[in-house]
Image (tube, helix red, strand yellow):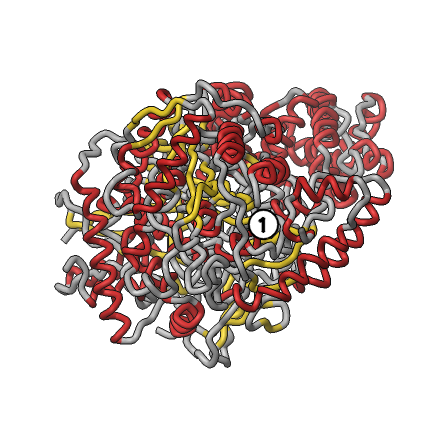
Amino acid sequence: MEFETIIGLEVHAQMLTDTKIFCNCSTKFGGAPNSHTCPVCLGMPGVLPVLNKKVVEYAMMMALATNCTINPSNSFARKNYFYPDLPKGYQISQYAYPLAEHGYVWIDMDGKQKKIGITRIHMEEDAGKLIHDENNPFSYVDLNRTGVPLIEIVGEPDIRSPEEAAEYLKRLHEILVYLEICDGNMEEGSFRCDANVSIRPVGQKEFGTRTELKNMNSFRNVQRALEYEVKRQQYLVENGESIIQETRLWDDAQGATNSMRSKEEAHDYRYFPDPDLVKVVVDEDWITQIRESLPELPVAKRERFIREYQIPAYDAGVLTADKALALYYEDVVRLCGKPKQASNWVMGDVLRFLNEGKRDIRQCPISARSLADMINLIEEGTISGKMAKDIVEDMYHTGKPPQDIIREKGLVQITDEGELTETIKAIIDAHPVQLADYRGGREKLFGFFVGQVMKATQGKANPQLVNNLLKKMLAP
Amino acid sequence: MELHQLTIHELQKLIQNGEVSSTQITRSVFSRIDEVEERIHSYIRLMKDEALAAAARADEDIKNGNIRPLTGIPVALKDIVCTKGITTTCGSNILHNFVPPYDATVVEKLSAAGAVFVGKANMDEFAMGSSTETSFFGPTRNPWDLERIPGGSSGGSATAVAADECIASIGSDTGGSIRQPAALCGVVGLKPTYGRVSRFGLIAFASSLDQIGPFTKDVEDCAIMMNVLAGYDPRESTSVKMEVPDYRQFISRDISGWKVGIPKEYFVEGIDPEVSAAINGAIDTVKKCGGQCIDISLPHTQYSVAVYYIIAPAEASSNLARYDGVKYGFRASGERDLMEMYRKTRMEGFGEEVKRRIMIGTYALSAGYYDAYYGKASQVRALIRRDFDEAFRECDIILTPTTPTPAFKIGEKTDDPLQMYLSDIFTISTNLAGIPGISVPCGFTAAGLPIGVQFLAGHFEEGKLLQIASAFEKNAAIEKRRPSL
Amino acid sequence: MKLSTQDVEYVAKLARLEFTDAQKEKFTVQLNNILIYIEKLGELDTTGIAPMSHAIAVSNAFREDVERPSLGTKATLANAPDARGEFFRVPKVID
């Protein structure tokens, strides 16, 4: 039987604000346990939440960047359930009236564009952390994370394969990071994803029973977990067994999903409007203001790079995948005026060094100015491309500008005709046999002479000049 | 007259003239407490040492000429407002040992105004009750008849003022919890407009209904307290940014020509005849003051108790979910499983009435019932508010009895929750609509139990309430009585 | 009866409450009386009436994104019935 896979993703992204969503505590990761806490986020009696305006603005940025419609009036609700990491016994979230709805993003699958719908984006607070004691019947609660601002991006079940899911996630991640509203760190939980998966025989209209997957903390794991789960569901159906609607946890070591035995009776969250919080009213002016503050988004940047710099789509894709890299590239182009060369050097040597050193473009020792200077030095003929390969490596390790390296190593190209003519003459004199063969028709030997000249000049000879002089002097 | 029998404005004069010190007043209040507290039980916790220290500081201020609106005045706080470093229980076992690391905004404001805190007043557990019988710390008794309830939930705040165990006090009102005990104890009690007085630090019962307000010995004192309490608080999202007038300016002003609406739905069967007679007397007094009484209708009044007993428990079921034995307060001992810990802690930590309301509220919000209960109630709530909006187009003030009966006997209604709930019938719709209301003494029954008249006004019209209440107080010719204790 | 003893048990579990059998029966009766009283709302036609969840219509109450000092671990744990080191301690979840 042929099956179709149906996937819908729910992404939680932590907003990069300084303080929590409803109080003034720090959102920094890694503080001493229970140190980023106050009566409000601890849910002490009598305290009240007040919404952080920046969270609304950041959430609006994401909503606009993903083509959502912002609801002119949206509000918060309480999701009631008991758990030790939830100090109030309810989570403040948005339910009936979310911030934004009806959006989409485009994903690229082997050159084909596909639209993935976004059902809604809403704001909510994060819960704390529960640490289980392996040896004792206790758990330990750290409430630092409690109240950290999140947006939940609920996707439509438009995804048809684990690859598409990974691609969609990468797009969302890229946008969030571009907007500088989320650090995108999956390991620290700043970008998390749950997936709803079902399968159905091709041609069937109704959806199959779905399972919810959790605990996948990298793009790769999302894809692996989905691949596993799709296979598991197919196996069950093919063997006449039924799929149970349940939550399953991805086990990275095992490479499998496992049922999270229903911890509680059927979920009955008793959502109702939070009486302690008031409506968020968003007028056109506010939307316009946020829209105008949006930076250029990855897709637009990619298209502009192709158009403006005349570079291939692939190159544009690599250069815009990281906003800082795109910025670096554009700086280099601005300083040297040579987009194609800039792209070759950035995508080639620079990225290779960074990858080898596991460094970020922000930590690149070669400044955009240095790289641009080096490209100009090649164009001016001061150095050869071959020399530049060595120079750029030195630049990376020392952080020095190319001019310094050239001066220190005496690497300036020989462009003096008289000096080169002398050298070539000596070489021709030393190789009479080869000269005779060349003149006899073995034109391949031209390369041999070039090599000899370069060797004699330690690669410093201007290749164009060497060519011209050799042609002239080797001629019968 | 003893110092503890005086009002704020009387004491202020004495303080300003250098005739008495705050320490003298405070000592007088504590000697009164020594005398009567055992019989009444107004307080869960007395703060004698803190109070005397605060009085000494007040006396320094007085000496330096730094006299603020409440400098040196002994004030009681309902044990529902959080006090930094002072155990705050909300009348519950589940918070019996909770020491807040913060002050409620009203506590900060009262402190800044120079008040001396006498203690934390007794109350129904989590403010759920109309008789102060549900307190984990035992009931409070009505100073006018120790066999009777003082009303609730702010019973201790009302009796402390009525029995001169403080000069003024703070209560909270979710469905009548200030006005009803004020009426039953013969003192003045005001529930401000929702959003007028900060709720920050007020332990929540039903967040969309709760409001803090004062108990005082007369209307002028009420205005003085409101001057201190009212105002916008950025720590509360539902706080309203609106200028606060000087409420004292409304005292002793003329009300002639005012239209006073008498809602026919409040004068139905079930009202005690003595209450009815006293209210008719109050209507006459209002007329004597120049008020023009007109018949009005608040057609959805009969639904207010039903609406209230869905919305308040629903919000409460969620507000009280934080009492889980993890972060503060009581935890049942010896439980090895989380679920068992939760259930035992909450079973032993909460009293019966609180559990009953959590059950109603949880049910009303649970899957499949939301629309029929919470959803429906929220719609009818809108209708109740609309009734008031329309009524206030016709009249300036609405006059009603505060309660259908005078204080009932302790234990009389504890086994019939519905009957207990119905005793709030005249006060509940005010909270649903968010409007302000005041209860002022308007007479006594033959047995000597106080009766209160309630005035209601439109949103943020506390000034009007004080104006009519003050005019009424001056003209009512009610005999000045004190409970014989 | 609107509410059965089973309903009471379900709701009690949702609310993390526990009752003895005698309490359960008493509660079932009392809750039913209250629910029957509440039923009277059904008489009203509320079609098209916007529900009211707040007493006063306020909107856009915001706070600026400015950090203020936290309580600190010690004060955070000061009221805890069971704290170990820098954590609140609770019994484990047992399925």
| In the displayed structure image, the side of residue A109 where residue B68 appears, left or right | right
Residue C93 showing in the rendered view = no
Please provide percent x and percent y for residue B114: 72, 45
Give residue A128's position: percent from left, percent from top.
51, 58
Res B252 → quadrant? top right
Q: Is residue B294 toward the left or the right of residue B229 in the image?
A: left
Q: Nearer the viewer, residue A259 or A28?
A: A28
Chain under numbered label 1: B
State the residue position of label 1.
B169
Please tell me whether residue A474 is drawn above or below residue A345 in the rendered image. Answer: above
Mark 1 element type: strand
Between B268 and B424, the one lying in front of the other is B268
Q: Is residue B96 visible?
A: yes
Quadrant in which the C terminus of chain B is drawn: bottom right
Q: In the rendered structure, which amino acid carries the disc numbered 1?
A: Ser
Which of the 4 image quarters holds residue B160?
A: bottom right
Residue at (63% x, 51% y) in the render: B5
Residue B342 to residue A20: above or below: below
